[in-house]
Image (cartoon, rainbow, N blue to C red):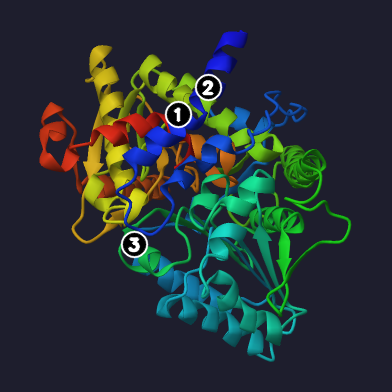
Amino acid sequence: MAAPAVLWRRIRGPGLLALLARLCDRDRGGRTPLFLLAPLVAPSVPPATTQRPTLGCVCPRGAHRFQWVGNLVPEFGISGSSVKILSSPAEFYQIMKSQAKTAKTRITMASLYLGTGVLEQELVDCIEETLQRTDRPDLHVSVLLDYTRGSRGKKNSRTMLLPLLRRYPDRVRVSLFHTPNLRGLLRLLAPERFNETIGLQHMKIYLFDDNVILSGANLSDSYFTNRQDRYILLQGCSEMADFFDELVAAVGDVSLQLEPDDTIHVEEGMEHPYEGDKAKYCEAAKNRVMNVIETARHKQCELHSASFQSREPTGATEAADTWVYPLIQMKPFGIQIDELVTETLLTEAERGDQLHLTTGYFNLTQGYMDLVLGTRADYNILLASPEVNGFFGAKGIAGAIPAAYVHIEHQFYNEVCRQGQRLRVQLREYFRDQWTFHAKGLWLYPAGKNMPCLTLIGSPNFGYRSVHRDLEAQIALVTENKDLQRQLHQEQQHLYERSADVTPETFRHPSRYVKLWVKLVTPLIKNFF
């Protein structure tokens, strides 16, 4: 077993550095192309436990085939009438502003970053106007962003939020998550953008009082105008809102706190994420997050049991016909619930089930890829054409990322064909002129049914980064509500109608040409984008 390790040390030596330097010497973006290798020398991600949480809750729940998810995470039973599927960036933006204007007690937002344009400023202004209202003295605002992405450039997410912090220091909290894997010499040398490959805060949770929006969209102008994503609004769900509020607070507690003078500090008693002991920091972070999950799970079990014994709904005006399960993935802390549930869903999907899976960045983990190719259900996978990839037209090395995705897509397509799975596993490419594509998630249609009964929606992309490097959150929503099923079906149809089948001809088109150096480099860096 020593031979592979020795070989890898040799491969990572000066020879590879020199080779990639020559391959990348056409970078005209002014950055040192060797920093493309920053991920290769990053600290390895600590192994996460594969042990399931204690399955201690045995209580009656909704009569559906996905009840087992409630043994891992809290199950929130709600009425499907309280759920609204949003369809466009413009609708998402308008809902965000209107919710911010009407919030009375809390505004909690978790995102990768907040943009610096006019639309983003309007959103911040809506929050400030609400804070200024004399009839909202108890309103508190909590914002969780990623440190590296939120600090990029002179004008950035931090500078956008500093006025709120200065005017309302007791009512506004801005937390900046810094991955514990970016530290030491790597942190010192890696420039902006490249340091973001190591790990990020990637959750997208937008909460206003008892209303929650789960999405894959960030708080930036393109996500409000012409960058297609998915969005779900859950209204009047107080217990679920409490859970996500506490989840964001838990991650915020282990993050860096932004001060009104633009300095940062660590919460008292917390280990520093990149200067302190890494193992202690990760353990403390895991304990905080898992405490939120387990406390909510046990509370929901008790409520379900009480409801069953009394034969009455638990405080809801309408009986539950929809069940929501929050799925959290934070592998740097050893939390891999989303991965476990996703793999189980793919494994247990029955013959005849149809799974529509979409991602803006098609780069499935080997585990997910094996399950798609090796299980019984039918798959229809929607991915971005190169022209709607968010990196299309970028300068320097980043401009080659769409070609890298084409290469990954082509390899997967060839494997589908090699295994004779083309009828069962189909690929489609999304295209819309002057738009980009960022939607991700899954819809499950049971065998013989023309409406989905389950969807996954949130921040994960089903790729290596989502599973191993970033902090992610999504929900599994299971519903028996016919109107909500129609909403989900229409959402899926709306996205897929702007797509075309992937065939052998697709990869012969000039836009799918992949340069040799991109093919050589992609296997080395595919786990970092």
Label 3 – label 1 distance at C-alpha:
48 Å
How crowded pointer 2 is (Cα within 10 Å; few <14, some 14-19, many 20+) is rated as: few
Which quarter of the image is occupied by the C terminus?
A: top left
Question: Is residue 393 toward the left or the right of residue 317 in the image?
Answer: left
The residue singled out by tag 3 in the image is: 88
Q: Position of residue 186 (x, y in %)?
A: 62, 46
How crowded pointer 3 is (Cα within 10 Å; few <14, some 14-19, many 20+) is rated as: some
Near-viewer residue (6 or 40): 6
Residue 295 lies in quadrant: top right
Q: Residue at x 37, y 33 (%)?
A: 522
Mark 1 near mark 2, Cβ–Cβ under 8 Å?
yes
Residue 422 lies in quadrant: top left
The residue singled out by tag 1 in the image is: 15
Q: What is the secondary structure assignment of the residue under circle 3?
A: loop
In this view of the protein, can residue 306 be seen by the observer? Answer: no
Which quarter of the image is occupied by the N terminus?
A: top right
Q: Residue at x 46, y 53 (%)?
A: 216
Query: Label 3 is placed on what type of residue?
Result: Ser
In this view of the protein, can residue 329 be seen by the observer? Answer: yes
